[in-house]
Image (cartoon, rainbow, N blue to C red):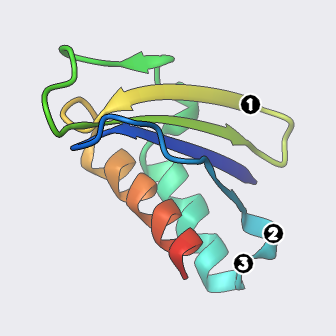
């Protein structure tokens, strides 16, 4: 599974470079955790945009694209105020993997 996360907004309002995670390169436990978060967030069933309002000051907007091993690809753009806790946890986990 390949996940590409781009985050923009926040205090400076600019986009950060995308974070790319290929779960096949992760330790088995971490791979299962990330793929489990994708499942819990029901990512492939989400609409392409989850925005309840315009992003506010100091709020982040995310663009997450996932390609799975079954050939499916899906992209979702969401604000932190409109995302489920599972989707926010997935975004946080992707950023933490990249930082490690």
**Mark closest to the chain's N terminus, 2 or 1:** 2
**Mark closest to the chain's N terminus, 3 or 1:** 3
Q: Residue at x 52, y 75 (%)?
A: 99
Task: Give left or right: position of 27 versus 79.
Answer: right
Q: Secondary structure at mark 2?
A: helix
**Label 2 belongs to which residue?**
24
Labels 3 & 2 near each other (Cβ < 8 A): yes
* Residue 32: quarter of image: bottom right
Q: Residue at x 58, y 48 (%)?
A: 17
Labels 2 & 1 near each other (Cβ < 8 A): no
Image height check: is 90 above or below 52? Answer: below
The Cα–Cα distance between marks 2 and 1, rounded to whole angstroms, is 16 Å
Image height check: is 21 above or below 54? Answer: below
Image quarter in which the N terminus is found:
bottom right
At label 3, counting other C-alpha atoms closer than 10 Å, the crowd grade (few under 14, some 14-19, many 20 or more) is: few
Residue 51's x, y, as percent?
29, 18
**Label 3 belongs to which residue?**
26
The one nearer the camera, 14 or 88, is: 14
Badge number at residue 73: 1
Image height check: is 73 above or below 87? Answer: above
Task: Give left or right: position of 48 versus 65.
Answer: left
Task: Give left or right: position of 20 versus 86.
Answer: right
Q: Residue at x 14, y 26 (%)?
A: 56
* Residue 81: quarter of image: top left
Image height check: is 43 above or below 21? Answer: above
Residue 60's x, y, as percent?
29, 39
The Cα–Cα distance between marks 3 and 2, rounded to whole angstroms, is 6 Å
Residue sitting farthest toward the front: 12
């Amino acid at each position: 599974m390949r996940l590409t996360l781009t985050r923009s907004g926040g205090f400076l309002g600019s986009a950060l470079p995308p974070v790319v995670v290929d779960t096949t390169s992760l330790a088995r436990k971490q791979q299962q955790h990330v793929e489990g978060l994708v499942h819990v967030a029901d990512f492939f069933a989400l609409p392409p945009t989850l925005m309840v309002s315009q992003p506010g000051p100091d709020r982040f907007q995310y663009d997450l694209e996932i390609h799975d091993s079954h050939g499916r690809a899906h992209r979702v753009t969401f604000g932190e105020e409109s995302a489920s806790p599972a989707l926010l946890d997935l975004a946080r986990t992707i950023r933490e993997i990249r930082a490690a």
